[in-house]
Amino acid sequence: MSTTPISPYQQTGGMIYFARMLDKIRKHHRGKLRDDFHANLGKGFDDRCAGFLRVSYEKLRERVLQGGSDEEILRWCFDTGRELDANDILIWNEFLRKRGWQDEVSGTLAERKRESGFENRSEIRTMLEYFEYDEGRKV
């Protein structure tokens, strides 16, 4: 059975979204990731997250498939790319929490809401909120 990835709010080392990206890689490898996620693997927020850590998505994917916990893989990213401090993680988290709210992603958010029948849901103001509703964690 194919499923959606875990919530983008799940944290690893205080960092949001990272665990979701790894979950998508693992589920896709096992043939368990819902089909509509396949085309964007390594793109969008995945690409932003890998880029923020200064690791290539492909190298990260290879590392994930070797095994290990999310924390071990984040440590690998710090060792391979760059170490993040608490301020870096705060900047990342707040950047991602607000994507789609009065920025260049607002149009994409409006389109996704329309496609999903959420155009009248004013409480969905960011992409992360959209994921929570679209994937059934919030109703």
Image (spheres, rainbow, N blue to C red):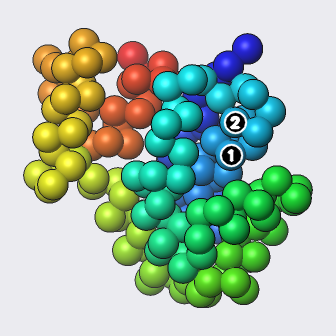
Q: CA distance from mark 2 to mark 1?
A: 5 Å
For this rendering, which residue is in front, 39 or 103? 39
Percent of width and height locating residue 84: 56, 83
Compared with 78, 31 (above or below) is above
Total labels drawn:
2
Q: Quadrant of the C terminus?
A: top left
Decide if residue 136 is on the left or right side of residue 67. Answer: left
The type of residue carrying mark 2 is His
Q: Mark number for residue 28?
A: 2
Residue lying at the far right of the rendered structure: 67
Percent of width and height locating residue 68: 87, 59
For this rendering, which residue is in front, 94 or 59? 59
The residue that appears at 34% across and 33% down in the rendered structure is 130
> Element under label 1?
helix
Decide if residue 117 is on the left or right side of residue 63. Answer: left
Using the rendered image of the protein, determine whether residue 14 is visible from the camera's viewpoint: no
> Which residue is identified by label 1?
25
Name which quarter of the figure residue 128 lies in: top left
Decide if residue 78 is on the left or right side of residue 84. Answer: right
For label 2, the crowd category at 10 Å Cα-Cα, with few meaning under 14, some 14 to 19 and many 20 or more, is: some
For label 1, the crowd category at 10 Å Cα-Cα, with few meaning under 14, some 14 to 19 and many 20 or more, is: many
The residue that appears at 73% across and 14% down in the rendered structure is 1
Percent of width and height locating residue 17: 53, 53
> Element under label 2?
helix
User: Do labels 2 and 1 touch, CB within 8 Å?
Assistant: yes
The residue that appears at 40% across and 52% down in the rendered structure is 44
Name which quarter of the figure residue 11 lies in: bottom right
The type of residue carrying mark 1 is Ile
